[in-house]
Amino acid sequence: MKKSKGLHAVAKQAVVSMTVMGTLIYCFLILGHTAAAQSALPGKSHPNQTPALTENAETSSPSLKPVHTKTVNCPLNVLVVGASTAHGWHDTKGNGYLARAFDTLTSTEGVAYRVVDKAIPGARIAEVSPRYTGWLRQYHPNVVVISWGLINDLKARTPYTSFLYDLQNEIDKALQANAKVFVITPPISRYSYTDFAAQQEELTRAEIHLVQRLQNPDVVSIDLFEQMKNTIASSNVPYQQYCASDSAHPNTRGHILAGRLLTADLANIYDTKPTDDHR
């Protein structure tokens, strides 16, 4: 029981935080871009309706939604870009950590997030670039969530400079399309502790530093990777319990923890003080 105490506290914090967090996220999305929120919206798109690209599996993610905003009924489009982890692979009870966060927040209040999942299993960041502009034009997203698992690019030995160049390009194009941008580092996998431990940590830090250097309020970085590592370490629960057997993805338990941490992390970014417990 002592081993899981830390994770239970984090889970509780995430649920407790959603009420105030929703209002602030809504303000972040809408107040600066009212016109974008009112732009034409596409039809519903299931989080797992995504074309396959290669046979390789990867690690990435999707997520977001407001709570006490019942007077606002306009849905918001969220475009998710990444690979198989963002797509929810190995989450046998849901559609992945990002989808879990969006679904929870949407079901809680009257503002719906329409998640358009364009995460492509097996994709490397450069392979998505030719399609990306078309997605922005087609779906008119209010929010673009960029969450690469990084393993595909690390296996392919993509130079860090090339990866970061493509990431910057994705951010720039999203901003040009009047969308807010969330760059979210991936959940952990076995590879995060073994074959690609040093490389994945280095590249996630480079992602965070890139966003910080931009100093753009419309671009937010969320270091889910480091937060998940620290949470697991402090709980004394073996990391393997959160990892799929293929080494490249979190399992269902990992997606659940990542989704809860992401919710809590969003609340911390806006320095919210939760007042209601909606357990």
Image (cartoon, rainbow, N blue to C red):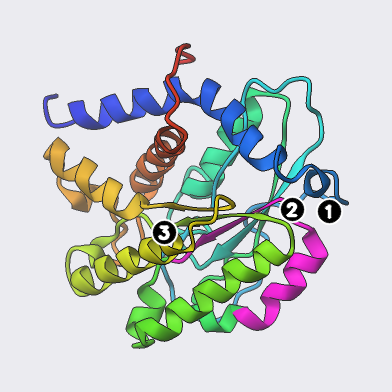
Q: Is residue 63 left or right of residue 4?
A: right
**Which residue in the structure is indicated by mark 3?**
212
**Which residue in the structure is indicated by mark 2?**
45
Residue at 42% across, 63% down: 213
User: Identity of the amino acid at label 2?
Assistant: Ser
**Which residue in the structure is indicated by mark 1?**
42
Asked if residue 68 is positioned above or below residue 38 in the image, the reply reads above
Mark 2 → mark 3, Cα distance in angstroms: 32 Å
Q: Secondary structure at mark 2?
A: loop
User: Identity of the amino acid at label 3?
Assistant: Gln
Whether the residues at callouts 1 and 2 have beta carbons within 8 Å, the answer is yes
User: Identity of the amino acid at label 1?
Assistant: Pro
Q: Is residue 30 left or right of residue 138?
A: left
Tell me residue 271's x, y (percent).
42, 30
Q: Secondary structure at mark 1?
A: loop
Residue at 28% across, 47% down: 228
